């Protein structure tokens, strides 16, 4: 997969490529959760999600922010055609992640007991080697993203998720069968815990296998493009050559704020996990099995579903950082503001209907994806409804954090996330202590956290470049179209279910029809112009469709 010259490519199209891969990856990740849940159960899913939250935090601190940070630094060099220095940054970044990733992996393995309950320690330790592998993968992804080419990262994400799905379910099944001698759910609580631990360990091995497959793919792509990189370096006539000491200093000063920002931004999941699985049982005595089973429904089902639409915002954010960084390196503030406006509007046009759709069709969607008991289905449904608004807030706050990083205001998201984190933690504790809302307290706190981030980040962007977001066509029109879509989709689902008695068929048709209705209403209400449609992937096709709808 050779690198192409994408200097003239619209960043929305590049984000679209990454978004498509991100959505496909998350759909694969969601679809395999159903057979995984069938194999390891809600308790096993609870142990897995509990360990996964802390693995994610260590990953964020050590390696996860590398693609974004490296793409920003290298994009600045490529903008002024310093190809030799760009490649030296790439090599220095590799050395950086080998050291940091190695330390982080060892820390997670030997200190797992500090974070999770004894039952989840083997699961968390299984994640440890993945951190080391991910660091190398992150540098390779960041290098290609700096060239405004998202295809390589996109393909690697899909391959990663496919390998993750296959290995997670397969190895979990084998470990449970090998340990228990049967796949039947034991009646004895101790055997249920043993079964769940082995299943969660198998799923954690799948995560590592996925990252390894993605790394092998990216290494292959790099080797294919190595000749082109070397020719650019030979042709580079820039006299100034950055020393490795200067580069390491630059990487440290850029990566550290990225790490802090991303880690704090994502710390809410780990804190909520700790509050519910460790603090809540102290406030109101509850069995560990019930706690982790409930957490499995919340984090493994409802939260996983709500995260799917945010994939587009994450992809847009990845495309925004090198794009805005390039504009700022060229002193083109108006160009940066224009890209910010297009990115925010595009993200809202997609996120708002997704949030409404998840609220309107929460029960059939959870029923489509998971095989639950009646009590678990009710819990997953109402939790998903409670989380639906967070889709909009998380999409916008994820994007705005990356906008600030691209503008060079890397400290702003750190402080904003810190304030939001304090607010959501206090709220979660108060709701758990003084109400009977149980897991719904965590869902509400999660939404409030993302909402605070939106407001604070918007203020920071406005102060940084004097940017003000257009409201009517970005928020109001998509919201009106989405509400109409949600009402029609819900009524259509109920009618189809009465007719077909098939919840799965009814919800699939309702989602498809709802998407078409939303797109038509968006165009009729003036939410998208022909020029904006042309910037989307397959923009010409969309523009022709829009012309026929309006005529």
Image (cartoon, rainbow, N blue to C red):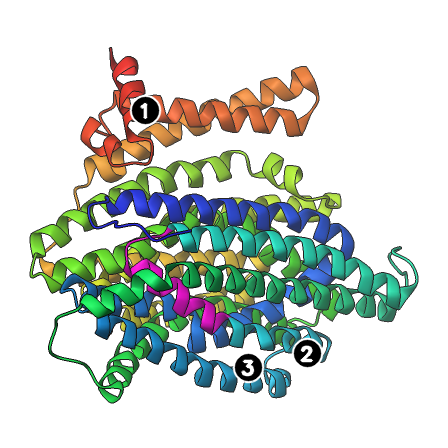
Q: Position of residue 228 (x, y in %)?
A: 31, 60
Of residue 303 and residue 259, the one placed in the foreground of this image is: 259
Q: Main secondary structure of the magenta part?
A: helix
Q: With 295 as the anchor, is 197 left or right in this view?
A: right
Q: Is residue 348 above or below residue 504?
A: below
Please name the residue that numbered disc 1 is placed on. Answer: 541
| Residue 149 is covered by the magenta coloring | yes
Q: Which residues are magenta?
A: 134-150
Q: Secondary structure at mark 3?
A: helix
Near-viewer residue (272 or 232): 232
User: Which of the labelled discs sits on residue 121, or is there none?
Assistant: 2
Q: From the viewer's perspective, tell me whether residue 536 is left or right of residue 432.
A: left
Q: Is residue 113 above or below residue 34?
A: below
Please name the residue that numbered disc 3 is placed on: 105
Residue 211 appears anywhere in the view: yes
Is residue 425 visible from the viewing direction of this image? no
- Regarding mark 1 in the picture, which secondary structure is present there? helix
Give the residue drawn at x 49%, y 77%. Answer: 58
Above or below, comparing residue 279 to residue 291 in the picture:
below
Q: Residues within 10 Å of mark 1 (few under 14, many from 20)?
A: few
Label 2, secondary structure: give it.
Answer: helix
């Amino acid at each position: 997969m050779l690198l192409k010259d994408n200097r003239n490519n619209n960043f929305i199209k590049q984000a679209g490529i990454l978004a498509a891969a991100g959505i496909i990856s998350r759909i694969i990740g969601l679809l395999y959760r159903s057979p995984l849940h069938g194999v390891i159960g809600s308790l096993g899913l609870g142990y897995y999600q509990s360990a996964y939250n802390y693995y994610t935090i260590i990953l964020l601190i050590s390696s996860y922010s590398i693609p974004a940070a490296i793409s920003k630094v290298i994009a600045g060099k490529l903008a002024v055609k310093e190809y030799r220095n760009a490649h030296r940054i790439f090599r220095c970044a590799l050395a950086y992640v080998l050291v940091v990733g190695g330390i982080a992996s060892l820390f997670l393995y030997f200190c797992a007991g500090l974070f999770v309950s004894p039952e989840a320690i083997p699961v968390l330790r299984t994640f440890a080697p993945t951190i080391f592998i991910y660091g190398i993968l992150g540098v390779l992804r960041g290098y290609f993203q700096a060239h405004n080419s998202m295809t390589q990262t996109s393909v690697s994400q899909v391959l990663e998720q496919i390998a993750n799905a296959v290995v997670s379910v397969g190895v979990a099944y084998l470990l449970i069968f090998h340990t228990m001698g049967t796949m039947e759910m034991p009646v004895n609580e101790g055997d249920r815990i043993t079964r769940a631990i082995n299943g969660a360990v198998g799923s954690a091995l799948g995560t590592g296998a996925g990252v390894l497959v993605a790394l092998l793919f990216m290494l292959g792509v790099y080797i294919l493009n190595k000749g082109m990189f070397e020719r650019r370096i030979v042709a580079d006539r820039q006299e100034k050559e950055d020393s490795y000491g200067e580069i390491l200093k630059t990487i440290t000063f850029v990566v550290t704020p990225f790490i802090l920002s991303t880690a704090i931004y994502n710390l809410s999941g780990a804190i909520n996990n700790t509050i519910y699985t460790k603090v809540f049982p102290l406030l109101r005595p509850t069995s560990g099995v019930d706690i982790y089973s409930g957490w499995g429904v919340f984090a493994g089902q409802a939260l996983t579903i709500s995260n799917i639409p945010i994939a587009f915002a994450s992809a847009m954010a990845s495309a925004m950082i090198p794009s805005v960084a390039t504009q700022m390196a060229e002193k083109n503030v108006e160009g940066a503001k224009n890209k910010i406006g297009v990115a925010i509007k595009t993200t809202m046009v997609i996120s708002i209907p997704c949030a409404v759709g998840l609220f309107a069709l929460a029960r059939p969607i959870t029923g489509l994806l998971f095989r639950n008991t009646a009590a678990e289905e009710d819990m997953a449904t109402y939790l998903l409804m409670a989380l639906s608004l967070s889709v909009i807030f998380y999409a916008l706050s994820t994007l705005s954090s990356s906008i600030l990083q691209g503008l060079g205001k890397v400290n702003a998201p750190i402080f904003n996330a810190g304030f939001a984190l304090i607010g959501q933690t206090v709220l979660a504790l108060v709701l758990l202590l003084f109400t009977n809302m149980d897991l719904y307290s965590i869902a509400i706190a999660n939404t409030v956290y993302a909402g605070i981030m939106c407001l604070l980040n918007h203020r920071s962007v406005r102060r940084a470049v004097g940017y003000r977001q257009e409201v009517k066509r970005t928020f109001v029109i998509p919201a009106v179209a989405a509400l109409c879509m949600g009402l029609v989709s819900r009524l259509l689902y109920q009618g189809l279910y009465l007719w077909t008695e098939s919840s799965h068929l009814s919800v699939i048709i309702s989602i498809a029809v709802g998407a078409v209705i939303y797109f038509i209403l968006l165009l009729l209400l003036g939410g998208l112009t022909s020029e904006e449609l042309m910037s989307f992937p397959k923009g010409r096709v969309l523009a022709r469709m829009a012309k026929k709808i309006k005529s």
